[in-house]
Amino acid sequence: MSASKVLFLLGNLGGAAGQCYRKDLAPEHKPEYVKTALPHTYTQASDLPAEFTWQNVNGKSMLTPLLNQHIPVYCGGCWLHGSTAVLNDRLNIARKGKTPQIMLARQVVLNCGTNESSDHYAGSCQGGTDKGVYNYMMKVGLPDETCQQYDATDHECSPLRTCMNCDNKASLKPGQDMCYPVTRYGKFFAQEWGPVTGVDNMKAEIFRRGPITCGVDSSRLEEGRYHRGEIIADLVRPQDGKAWEADHVISIVGWGAAQGEEYWIVRNSWGRYWGEDGFVKIATGKNVMNIEADCNWVVIGADPVTDIFGPSDADRLFPSADVSTLDAEGYAQALASKFQYLDVATFIRRLNATQGFGLEYNSDTIKNIAEHPPATFAGLIDAIKTAPASPRTFHGQPLIVVAVAGSVAAGLAILLGATVCIVGRRRLFGRRSREVSRVGLTDEQATEVA
């Protein structure tokens, strides 16, 4: 178990929901991450409207659907959901509300942003940071959610766990898995990200470029301390009177005012049924719940970078890339792939299906050739033709083993049948003997009658 997970568990002993925001895990922000002028440098406080929200821009909402970090199982992923909500919203804003809206695959961050020794560590279900997600988006990029569905679990990082598809059972070849990595898809990247604090600076950033994330103390929102419709204005934690301590990440989508009190319009990640349709109002200018002390923004590119990010899926029911020709040109593409072993193996399987070389789908012949592929297409054909014949298999077992197993099973069945016959005959004659004795016939006489 990593040191950060140990610290998380120890720190979680006394908390209700646990500390899902782990500021100690945040990556270092570098000046070069900021590439354009910050909104507060060209926006005066007097230029800002009294009220503003991305929920209503000229009668149209620019926000994307709300999220729930806690299903299908509990995951301490507030850092992931707060930041993903901001990324989704800002992507929608950058695309000028074009439909269908794009939702980024937040599950990929749980799968591939969990290596603490990497330069793109973001967090896990044991905690993380919004800064980590923005940093991951800048260095690695994220596909959209059609590549990977959220299941609130930290999986291994692999091409399959980055973008996957699944074939129906009827189309599978012996030895072929139902689900597989997708070859060609798009990734969205962050262009810049950075911190922002202070009411006027936060407003300028939100107004000019979109929602922002902030670290807050969630205790005021838990265990019945929050009531729908209220504007939270507490200056200290209600349960113990202590200073606020950030343990949760939310997004701010705008600001408003009611009864002389200005407030932030805050979106949470606990589902639409929580709060006011997933939102809550928190007073501005008082650093309530720590909301104005630790915030971040991100700029995301409006268009994806579409490329070959996974191994070949050309032998699948739903190939994602243009299927290469089964000739020297197609083989050259397989050789040049960064997934050379997998793509050469797929090329051989496709070639085998059309040329009838008689190779099994997962035969050692295919694996051996793919591990040491010939330099030319002609060399490949020669290697396939001269390779030792692989034993025929049935559901992964050599046919000779299947045949022996079948013979043994048949022999056992015959023996079992004979035993049942003998036992049955004995029972029959034993029953018949008792019946004969009751009518006064001998066994020989009964047999003649039968």
Image (cartoon, rainbow, N blue to C red):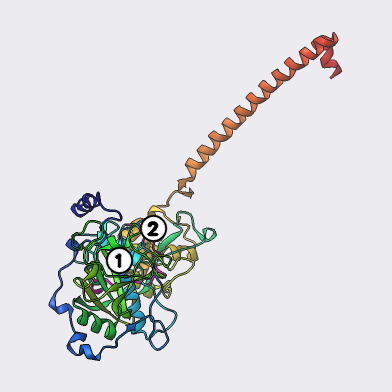
Magenta: main secondary structure equals loop
Q: Select label 2 or label 1 by which is in front.
A: 1
- Within the magenta stretch, is there residue 148? yes
Q: Residues within 10 Å of mark 1 (few under 14, many from 20)?
A: many
Q: Residue at x 38, y 53 (%)?
A: 364
- Within the magenta stretch, is there residue 198? no
Q: Which mark is residue 410?
A: none
Q: Residue at x 46, y 45 (%)?
A: 398
Residue for badge 2: 366
Q: Residue furthest front?
A: 259
Q: Amino acid at mark 2?
A: Ile
Quadrant position of the C terminus in the picture: top right
Q: How many marks?
A: 2
Q: Amino acid at mark 1?
A: Leu
The image shows residue 255, relative to residue 58, as above or below, that is: above
Query: Could you say where residue 330 lies in the image, as x and y percent from the top left?
Result: 38, 73
Q: Which mark is residue 80?
A: 1
Q: Nearer the viewer, residue 5 or 333?
A: 5
Query: Could you say where residue 332 lies in the image, as x and y percent from the top left?
Result: 34, 72
The image shows residue 427, relative to residue 166, as above or below, that is: above
- Mark 2: secondary structure: helix
Q: Decide if residue 72 is on the left or right side of residue 192.
A: right
Q: Residue at x 21, y 59 (%)?
A: 241
Magenta range: 138-154
The image shows residue 6, relative to residue 107, as above or below, that is: above
Q: Report which quarter residue 319 is drawn in.
A: bottom left
Query: Could you say where residue 273 lies in the image, as x and y percent from the top left?
Result: 43, 65
Query: Could you say where residue 381 lies in the image, as x and y percent from the top left?
Result: 39, 65
- Mark 1: secondary structure: helix
